[in-house]
């Protein structure tokens, strides 16, 4: 049985990764299970992989366990790939530049609201900014891509593997659905657009309208996980039960 620390401050990611490892001889250990918040890791990498490997390595050394970390985000074609690695705090950023002093205030607001409500409020601000940034842009130019990099680090902090999953889709014009998290109410996966074209009368659904299992089958996180699954199975198989 492999004890796998999943380092994240994002409950939506933790929910999805717990689902994805079910059936593997893996015990997921979360920051709450350790009774300690993960130490803040400055995500200053230019790529999702750089950030995922930095988080995995830092949190593996801190926890003393094999550690999986995820860095992910939304890349919108018409915005030149933004928000990308800035997806989590996009609405706190001034005009796309480095975090402005305003974001400190936003951070303070988040502290006042507490982590869960603070994150939900930030996600809403991110979605407002996404709709405003794409105001007047027609469907044909609302293409986008979710990207997730999962990095697995050994307890000494060395990186065992990093994998990337992507999911193409289109940004909708209004929020729909309550599932998933973050940008999901605005992200319509290409697979849904293709199905709706075959089944007139059943409109394409957003990621937030899909069941958990449907999202896992389509999502960038599910695609990345299916690539790292053999590595986890090998490590788990090599352990005593
Ligand atoms: O609707 C969404 N469905 C998804 O499936 C998804 N995956 C990523 N994202 C967005 O990208 C940010 C990641 O930023 P991120 O990788 O830095 O994570 P985070 O800061 O939330 O937690 P941590 O893992 O770093 O502790 C998140 O906050 C979200 O806004 C998603 N949005
Ligand atoms: Mg983060």
Image (tube, grey):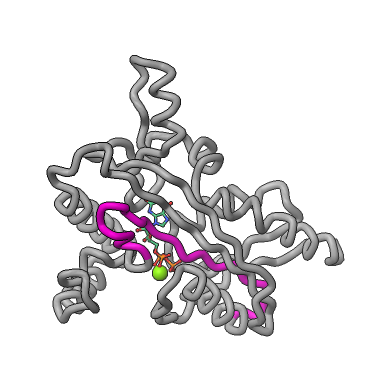
Q: Which residues are magenta?
A: 63-84
Which of the 4 image quadrants contains residue 158? Answer: bottom right
* Residue 95 magenta-highlighted: no
- Residue 36 appears left or right of 143: right
Where's residue 110, x and y in %? 24, 69
Where's residue 172, x and y in %? 26, 39
Residue 5 seen in the figure: no
Q: Quadrant of the C terminus?
A: bottom right
Residue at 42%, 52% in the rendered image: 146
Quadrant assignment for ligand 1? bottom left
Residue at 43%, 19% in the rendered image: 198
Q: Nearer the viewer, residue 12 or 85?
A: 85
* Residue 75 magenta-highlighted: yes
- Residue 1 appears left or right of 59: right
Residue at 46%, 34% in the rendered image: 191
Where's residue 130, x and y in %? 22, 53
Residue 232 vs 40, above or below: the answer is above
Which of the 4 image quadrants contains residue 157? Answer: bottom right
- Residue 63 appears left or right of 91: right
Where's residue 187, x and y in %? 34, 43
Residue at 13%, 43% in the rendered image: 136
């Amino acid at each position: 049985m492999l004890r796998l620390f999943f380092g994240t401050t994002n409950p939506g990611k933790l929910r999805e990764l717990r689902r994805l490892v079910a059936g593997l001889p893996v015990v997921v250990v979360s920051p709450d299970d350790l009774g300690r918040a993960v130490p803040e890791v400055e995500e200053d990498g230019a790529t999702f992989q750089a950030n995922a490997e930095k988080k995995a390595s830092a949190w593996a050394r801190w926890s003393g366990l094999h550690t999986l970390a995820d860095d992910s985000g939304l890349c919108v074609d018409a915005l030149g790939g933004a928000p990308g690695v800035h997806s989590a705090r996009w609405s706190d950023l001034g005009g796309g530049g480095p975090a402005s002093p305003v974001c400190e205030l936003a951070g303070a607001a988040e502290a006042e609201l507490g982590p869960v409500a603070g994150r939900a409020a930030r996600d809403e601000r991110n979605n407002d900014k996404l709709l405003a940034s794409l105001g007047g842009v027609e469907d044909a130019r609302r293409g986008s891509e979710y990207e997730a990099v999962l990095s697995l680090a050994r307890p000494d902090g060395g990186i065992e593997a990093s994998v990337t999953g992507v999911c193409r889709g289109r940004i909708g014009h209004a929020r729909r659905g309550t599932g998933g998290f973050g940008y999901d109410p605005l992200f319509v996966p290409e697979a849904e657009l293709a199905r709706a074209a075959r089944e007139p009368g059943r409109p394409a659904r957003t990621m937030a309208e899909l069941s958990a299992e449907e999202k896992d089958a389509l999502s960038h996180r599910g695609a990345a996980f299916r690539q790292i699954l053999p590595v986890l199975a090998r490590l788990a198989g090599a352990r005593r039960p």
